[in-house]
Amino acid sequence: MPALIIYALFLVYVLWRLFRPIEGGEREFLLAGRTLTLPAFVATTVSSWYGGILGVGEYSYRYGLCNWLVFGVPYYLYALIFALFLARRARRAPIRTVPDQLLRTYGPTVAITGSIVLFLMTAPAAYVLALGSLLKHITGLSLAPMVIVGTLFSLAYVYRGGFRSVVLTDKVQFILMFLGFLILLPTAVWKLGGFGWLKANLPVGHLDWKGGQAPQAIAVWYFIASGTLVEPAFYQRCFAAKSGSVARRGLLVSILFWITFDFLTTFTGLYARAALPDLTAAGGLGAQGSYPALAEMLLPSALSGLFMVGLLATIMSTIDSYGFLAAITFGRDIVWRLRGARGDSNRYSRLGIWVTGVVSIVLALWRESIIDLWHDLGSVGTPVLLFPLALSFRERPIRSGWILAGMLLGGGVSLAWVVVETRTGSYPLGIEPIFPGLLLSGLAAMGGALEARVNGYRRD
């Protein structure tokens, strides 16, 4: 597969020639010297968002147009809020990571607690699973070694080059991810037929907004998507932007690219469902293999190989981004802080890369479902981080005791809900885990906000 070989050689070139270990300090390693331009901002932000591309294919294959309403619309809305109200503030803040903001506002206990949860949320387990599944499909080998190899290869160049290596590879991966679907979807329309053919061959309900699901199953993703307001990838790129205006405009432009890409992926999934109604034997991937199966059916071998490279690039751009964020969180914001914030924090961040790889591999092989990993980690992590970070920019910040109580109660209840479901097959009271978690953490935040208003406490 020539396209795959060329892509692999490009990554090796990045690893061994372009980037030697950076000696320019924390600002350079974490934020690329805060020099991110608008095109670079957009390319790295857009490409880092779609590592679960096989999960998107599975969801659109199973539930149709509903995919756009679940994995598209709510994220656009929260990204728009972030762009309008948080992007410039984040760029102006004298911090380098999300836990820095928690430390600055609430103190070390809240910062460490938030760092632990943030590490688990950013560890790219779902994307490592997607990459391993695709490599298994391509090579015919078993899942576990492909997960391990894919993880090590995705994180190696981050170890050497820091955030600059992430940005450089994301520029190429941004082009590849769009190119693949711009080849496959028009080919499907040309060879199979237009919207009329699609409507005639799809199951009943695939063009319905619910996709045959209960409203709660859709609504829960609008609450999970609120985690976008604490999205560490957004914050990191805003911290790294040349200016606040670059950060704000970059997110607004990124939303337009996400809308375009979601159109391509959703309708490609619909064509896969209509043309290939039974994918139980699609290279062992099942419905997750809808995109590769459609490409192999419709494209000549050279273009099919290029499409596979586009899928690999889409996944790897997310693994390196979130793997790097998780490594920083573990190495710098947890270990380095606990050791008194002495010495070179970059050394601890590089250690965190390998810890992140191991944790991601274990989680991926344990859960073996991209969508379940998104759902469970988002359901537990969002109640812990949403209110503390969103309220940390207030003129009257809330006392840390209220915040810590909300983090522990909200996250603890949501985690208990998830554990019960894994053991019994259903949630307590039939309620999704994010709802009780957000309720408790929100009540704690409300109590703290009322106290701050009564006491007139202001930031120093």
Image (cartoon, grey):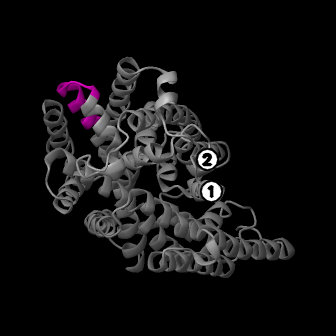
Relative to 3, 376 lies left or right: right
Judge whether residue 18 is colored magenta: no
Q: Which residue is mark 1?
A: 214
Residue 405, horizontal then vertical, whole percent: 64, 81
In this rendered view, identify the residue nearer to me: 419 or 197.
197
In this rendered view, identify the residue nearer to me: 278 or 263.
278
Q: Which residue is mark 2?
A: 210
Seen in the picture, residue 412 relative to 155 is either above or below; the reply is below
The quadrant of the image that shows the C terminus is bottom right
Judge whether residue 302 is colored magenta: yes
Q: Quadrant of residue 132?
A: bottom left
Dot 2: few (<14), some (14–19), or many (≥20) neighbours within 10 Å?
Answer: some
Residue type, numbered disc 1: Ala
Is residue 344 something one can see in this rendering?
Answer: no
Q: Main secondary structure of the magenta part?
A: helix
Q: Residue at x 82, y 73 (%)?
A: 450
Residue 454, horizontal then vertical, whole percent: 86, 75
Count up the numbered dots: 2
